[in-house]
């Protein structure tokens, strides 16, 4: 199916063109310049379409290379045969173009005006100078243009607009408009990196990738596999732009295609200086200053795609080998020259170097390019490398959330020392606990290893792992004890520091000691960055830090950290998806569920290929359910809830309170307020049983937002024991609600807004409106309702139990409103009775009283009265 390609992101250019064409001095025009494929022709045609809609007569001509040899060749189809001396020909042609228009203004579009013959160029010039017509010209950048046309913008008869390629955000908007759905951010970035926003290249590339099913939809989000073969049509188009390449120039271009960027001296040494200069003059390569080096790159990434597709396998392998050897001769002066050498060598005609490959695999692991670490590590193993290469491979597979049971068994078999056995065991336990989701087996293996190990180094490594396991399994006090021992020991290995810091942060986060997170996180990140085995731990570590900051109410700090994580995650799908989960978590905590839903859906789609994803899919679903509930997409929310409950991760017990709160928010969205409160209290009970005070604060505050007045005493106590602004704000909110004090509730709303939790602030303001209404303070009610509406707007239109009541006060009890809401959603009396565990007669009695109080007679009327702007279920 052929797709329609609108040019999203060109409105500013269209407005500029329209403004120039509507100039006060009469007909003039505009010339659109830019490289091939950026959208000049589309813009010119759109300008003529708009002019026609405004009543103008329009003409469209196209300059061609073949027509350039004919007098008035571009206008021949419009004018027919015109003969005579040049001046009479021009007068007759100008009259013919406007003759049948009468008093109607005429707009002439000239595509590829750089290809006009001399007489056509003079005709365009006279149309403008004599103000006979408005002209819209397109000219390809870098082409020579005849003087009569050039003088039009040089002498300011017409305006000039340089049409640039689409920036990345506009490219993403265009792709989503074409594909009809959201597209993964990393896929947008990759497609933009290849096409650089050139709309023509983008169209050809995307159409082929959709046909080949390499650009496909998963979980409602479009993603690109990142592996493509340039279509023949696109290859021909790009080859035409590149022109005929001499053999020396082609050699320079091909070297860059397989190994850019290259220093000028290296490239000229591999080819010759004249060829590189000719490639630069032809616009095929660009030379940029980087520090003290001049670096050469292809002028457009698509050139590399085309040349790699056309290149034979043997030639590509030979060229990679030549570059790798040249890098070796320079002495690997840059930090990642060794990694570049290895990447080139592994796909070259060179004999494999196990030492180079092992060193490079470790460097890739440190950079969290885990697929590359696996590839280089496996190549090192094939070349005869031993335990170290195997350790890198197994650890990288673990970091990608891929079960590595077979690889771990092989690794253990090659372990030659007790220390190597311990390292392999640590990886095996991580695989069991997080990737295979079998924590009981993992703990058994860990206990067995602990009973056998006597050396201090091995004991410290195992204790560090235990601290992380305890923190994730909701044993925060034990996690802190184990981690403290490890971190206080003399010179623990980096891997042990990263593991212990992660366990320490998990304990601090849930115990409510968020003010102590910073130093522990910093030490863990520094250690992870040096490790070739556990560098990937930086993402779980950051995730644990964000959980602690979210629970404590340090939402702006959490947002800053999540954004930094996202910006550093480019290049690897798994880490980008994890960072998307973190962005969604923080955005949702700030009360912006629509924005959060975009992040979480994209992350959910990105994690699809990684199974449990080490528990990150479970975390993603927890937040996704709440976002769907708050945005009113109950059908999708129920589906996500079913997936969440079916995929509970048995190792991540510290997230169980959050999981129960997701169920609470789903019940609240359905109008089942008593069920919502029950889930919130269950979350609090779980938190109490495991000593997770920070989770208890959030759970009780959630129950409070649902209207529970019984939690003030406990929240006041927790405010003295838990770090961060949330505990203080929740206690103030609870005390004000218990006292039915509207002024104090509005103050609590301001406190919560200052903390950054806009949704809880809206709930507190709604509680204030209800309190004022009960006391007959009409003016105060209006003020509070205005505050609710303002906050709800900042919450992207989200509605909660409290804000529905606050914005629309009705003379109903909590139970009456709950039953009325469920009835308005289309539920029968029997279904409501089953849901709330009451008798059908009780439901009937409550509905009778509701209808009497608010004057309704049917469920449809209830839906109209209780609605919040969204179509109720069953009455769309």
Image (tube, rainbow, N blue to C red):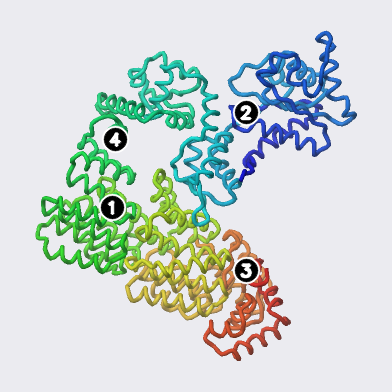
Q: Nearer the viewer, mark 4 or mark 3?
A: 4
Residue tagged 3: 784
Mark 3 or mark 1: name the one nearer the start of the chain: 1
Residue situated in front as seen by the camera: 707 or 846: 846
Contact flag, marks 4 and 2 (Cβ < 8 Å):
no
Mark sitting earlier along the chain (4/3): 4
For the residues carrying marks 1 and 2, which lies nearer the camera in this image? 2
Q: Residue at x 49, y 17 (%)?
A: 281
Say what secondary structure mark 3 lies in.
helix
Disc 2 marks which residue? Answer: 162
In the image, taking residue 31 as reference, residue 722 lies left or right, namely: left
x%, y% of residue 763? 55, 69
In the picture provided, is 524 more to the left or to the right than 213? left
Give left or right: position of 11 versus 188: right
Q: CA distance from mark 2 to mark 3?
A: 51 Å
Instruction: Look at discs 1 and 4 and give the one toward the viewer.
Output: 4
- Could you tell me residue 241's position as x and y percent? 54, 24
Q: Is residue 159 visible?
A: no
Going from the N terminus, do you reach mark 1 or mark 4 first? 4
The one of 94 and 493 positioned closer to us in this rendering: 94
Q: Nearer the viewer, mark 3 or mark 1?
A: 1
Q: Marks 4 and 3, how far apart in space?
A: 67 Å
First of labels 1, 2 by sequence position: 2
Q: Which mark is nearer the camera, 2 or 3? A: 2
Q: Which residue is outermost to the left?
A: 454
Question: SS for tag 2?
Answer: strand
Q: Which residue is mark 1?
A: 524
């Amino acid at each position: 199916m052929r797709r329609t390609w609108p040019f999203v992101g060109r409105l500013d250019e269209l407005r500029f063109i329209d403004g120039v064409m509507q100039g006060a001095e009469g007909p003039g025009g505009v010339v659109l310049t830019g490289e091939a494929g950026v959208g000049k022709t589309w813009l010119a045609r759109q300008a003529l379409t708009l002019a026609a809609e405004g009543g103008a007569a329009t003409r469209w001509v196209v300059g061609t290379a073949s027509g350039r040899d004919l007098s008035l060749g571009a206008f021949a189809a419009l004018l027919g045969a015109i003969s005579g001396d040049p001046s009479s020909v021009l007068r007759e042609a100008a009259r013919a173009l406007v003759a049948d228009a009468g008093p109607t203004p005429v707009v002439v579009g000239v595509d590829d005006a750089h290809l006009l013959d001399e007489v056509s160029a003079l005709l365009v010039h006279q149309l403008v100078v004599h103000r006979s017509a408005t002209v819209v010209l397109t000219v390809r950048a870098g082409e020579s243009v005849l003087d009569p046309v050039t003088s039009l913008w040089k002498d300011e008869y017409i305006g000039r607009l340089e049409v640039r390629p689409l920036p990345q955000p506009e490219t993403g908007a265009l792709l989503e408009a074409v594909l009809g759905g959201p597209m993964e951010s990393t896929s947008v970035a990759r497609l933009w990196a290849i096409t650089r926003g050139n709309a023509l290249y983008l169209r050809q590339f995307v159409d082929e990738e959709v046909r080949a099913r390499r650009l496909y939809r998963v979980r409602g989000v479009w993603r690109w596999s990142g592996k493509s073969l340039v279509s023949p049509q696109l290859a021909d188009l790009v080859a035409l732009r590149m022109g005929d390449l001499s053999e020396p120039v082609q050699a320079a271009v091909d070297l860059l295609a397989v190994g850019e960027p290259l220093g000028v001296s290296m490239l000229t040494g591999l080819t010759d200086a004249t060829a590189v200069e000719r490639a630069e003059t032809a616009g095929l390569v660009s030379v940029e200053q980087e520090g003290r080096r001049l670096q050469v790159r292809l002028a457009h990434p698509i050139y590399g795609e085309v040349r790699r597709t056309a290149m034979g396998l043997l030639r590509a392998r030979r060229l990679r080998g030549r570059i790798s050897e040249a890098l070796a001769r320079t002495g690997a002066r840059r930090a990642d020259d060794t990694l570049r050498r290895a990447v080139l060598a592994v796909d070259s005609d060179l004999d494999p170097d196990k030492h180079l490959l092992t060193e490079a695999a470790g460097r890739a692991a440190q950079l969290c390019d885990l697929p590359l670490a696996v590839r280089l590590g496996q190549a090192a193993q094939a070349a005869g490398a031993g335990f170290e290469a195997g350790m890198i491979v197994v650890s990288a597979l673990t970091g990608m959330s891929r079960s590595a049971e077979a690889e771990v068994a092989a690794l253990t078999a090659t372990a030659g020392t007790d220390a190597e056995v311990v390292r392999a065991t640590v990886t095996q336990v991580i695989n069991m606990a997080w990737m295979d989701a079998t924590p009981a087996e993992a703990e058994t293996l860990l206990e067995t290893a602990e009973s056998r190990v006597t050396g201090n180094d091995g004991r410290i490594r195992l204790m560090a792992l235990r601290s992380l396991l305890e923190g994730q399994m909701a044993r925060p006090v034990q996690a802190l004890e184990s981690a403290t021992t490890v971190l206080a020991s003399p010179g623990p290995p980096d891997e042990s520091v990263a593991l212990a810091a992660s366990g320490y942060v998990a304990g601090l986060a849930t115990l409510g000691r968020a003010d102590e997170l910073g130093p522990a996180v910093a030490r863990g990140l520094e250690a992870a960055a040096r490790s070739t085995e556990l560098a990937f731990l930086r993402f779980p570590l950051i995730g644990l830090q964000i959980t602690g900051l979210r629970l404590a109410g340090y939402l702006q700090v959490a947002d800053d950290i999540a954004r930094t994580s996202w910006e550093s995650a480019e290049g690897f799908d798994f880490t980008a998806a994890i960072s998307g989960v973190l962005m969604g978590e923080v955005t949702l905590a700030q009360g912006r569920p629509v924005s959060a839903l975009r992040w979480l859906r994209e992350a959910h789609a990105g994690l699809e290929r990684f199974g449990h994803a080490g528990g990150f899919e479970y975390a993603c679903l927890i937040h996704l359910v709440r976002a769907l509930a708050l945005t009113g997409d109950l059908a999708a929310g129920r589906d996500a809830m079913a997936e969440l409950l079916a995929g509970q991760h048995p190792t991540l017990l510290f997230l169980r309170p959050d999981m129960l709160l997701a169920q609470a928010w789903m019940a609240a969205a359905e109008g089942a307020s008593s069920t919502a409160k029950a889930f919130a209290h269950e979350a609090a009970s779980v938190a109490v049983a495991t000593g997770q005070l920070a989770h208890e604060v959030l759970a009780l505050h959630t129950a409070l937002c649902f209207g529970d007045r019984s939690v003030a005493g406990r929240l006041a106590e927790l405010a003295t024991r838990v770090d961060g602004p949330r505990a203080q704000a929740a206690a103030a909110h609870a005390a004000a609600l218990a006292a039915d004090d509207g002024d104090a509730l509005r103050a609590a709303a301001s406190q919560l807004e200052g903390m950054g939790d806009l949704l809880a602030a809206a709930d507190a303001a709604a509680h204030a409106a209800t309190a004022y209404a009960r006391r007959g303070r009409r003016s105060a009610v209006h003020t509070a309702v205005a505050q609710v509406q303002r906050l709800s707007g900042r919450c992207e239109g989200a509605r909660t139990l409290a804000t529905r009541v606050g914005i629309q006060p009705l003379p109903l009890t909590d139970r009456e409103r709950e039953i009325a809401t469920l009835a308005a959603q289309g539920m029968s009396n029997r279904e409501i009775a089953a849901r709330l565990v009451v008798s059908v007669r009780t439901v009937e009695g409550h509905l009778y009283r509701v209808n009497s109080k608010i004057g309704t007679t049917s469920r449809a009327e209830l839906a109209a009265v209780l609605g919040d702007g969204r179509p109720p279920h069953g009455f769309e």
